Image (cartoon, rainbow, N blue to C red):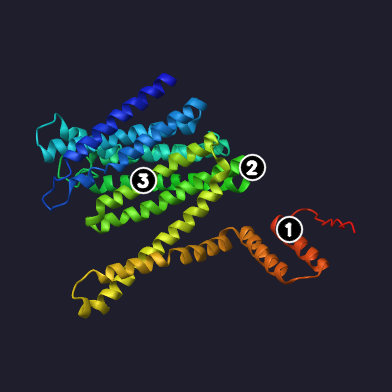
Amino acid sequence: MSALRMALVALTVVLALAATALGWLNRDTSTPPGQSLGSKALDIGFPIAALTFVVVAELIGRRHPRHLVGWMFLALGFSAAILFVDQNYGLYGTITAPGALPAAGTVMWLSTWTWSLPVAALVVALLVFPDGRPISPRWWGVAWVALFACVVQGFADAYRTPLVLTDLRMDTPLGTPFPLEALNVVSLIGTLGSFAAALAAAGSLIIRFRRAAGIEHQQLKWVAYGSGVATVAFVIGSFGYVVPEIGPLGGAVAALGTLLIPITAALAILRYRLYDVDVVVERTLVYGALSATLAATYWLLALVLQSVLQPITAGSELAVAGSTLATLALVQPLRTRIQRRVDRRFYRSRYDAARALDRFTTELATELDLGAVRASLLTAVGETLQPTSASVWLREQPR
């Protein structure tokens, strides 16, 4: 099993490098409407994501050779690497340099009906996380639904023209013996099946999280964090389809967000820095909100200052410099305010403890009565540490 795993990892590395090289060659090629094939050939971030999945699979396999999550990550990364190299190979051999590569059209056709394989592998991985088994044997039905949807989707896409993921008017090697309307219906069934299986797998994680305690609870927190950030990255990346000018940037953001799924799963399964997840989540919330607020503030100030100072500065960079300095001055106050809001909303106990300490410090500075100080100290300890009991012993000074 270890030899097979290593062989698949090595082959994935070769395929990802080949996909990256071919994607670079396709970067300036355009279809007649002017759409860049470099971005459509799946950006460089996605081969990196495929490599991340197989590296994580290897790390998990070394510690737990039979762990199903590791094998699913390996299948996901390997099939994704095949998809990427097929897509770029086909685009190069049919559009960038027609006839330069053998069977380019057939290879690109392979990529159009195998894209659902990584989706099925990811669904199964989520279903059996973190111990390699579903919640109960009945949940294996979700895995079978995902596999069925993958087969149905692949069948429909193998016969559809234009080729899926390319928008190119090319005939499939199998011909088109079925009506396009029927194939669209079959494809819809496959898409709905994959979506339902993914929702069920996510639901199983929620059920596990509600039942879990201790180590498993922390493991599920890591994956929840990775999946949440990946979802946000996919939403941001989807804007690349609406605004073609930022298509490559959107693809890169989506690919980098995908990296967090295998990375957080590896941290959870290997139990590396398992209990640091709360710190990571808190800092992500704080600095994510801070970055978004500063960016919005900068652009708003730049627009306002440019409109106000335009008659005076006549196109100088004074507005940009002023908005930059103002934004820098707001970093620390905004960070403090956002930190308090995040603690109050998501880490209430920490927020209450900080308020209790501030209140005790204020009272201590003005209180002279020893009994009152003792009572305030017990109250602060009770609110911050929450012990089952607390007492204060005072030693009298010898006279």
**View extreme (front): residue:** 399
Instruction: Give the residue displayed 48% in from the left and 57% down from the top.
Output: 285
Q: Which residue is mark 3?
A: 256
Q: Position of residue 156 (x, y in %)?
A: 28, 41
Identify the mark at residue 214; answer none if there is no mark.
2
Sequence-wise first label, 2 or 1: 2
Mark 2 vs mark 1, foreground winner is 1
Mark 1 vs mark 3, foreground winner is 1
Foreground residue, 316 or 216?
Answer: 316
Sequence-wise first label, 2 or 3: 2
The kind of secondary structure element at disc 2 is: loop
Identify the mark at residue 381; answer none if there is no mark.
1
The kind of secondary structure element at disc 1 is: helix
Foreground residue, 206 or 296?
Answer: 296
Mark 2–mark 3 distance (CA, rounded to whole Å): 30 Å
In this rendering, does residue 346 appear at all? yes
Horizontally, is 82 left or right of 365 in the view? left
Total labels: the figure holds: 3
Instruction: Give the residue displayed 77% in from the left and 61% down from the top.
Output: 378
Q: Quadrant of residue 157?
A: top left
State the quadrant of the N terminus.
Answer: top left
Foreground residue, 95 or 200?
Answer: 95
The amino acid marked with disc number 1 is Val
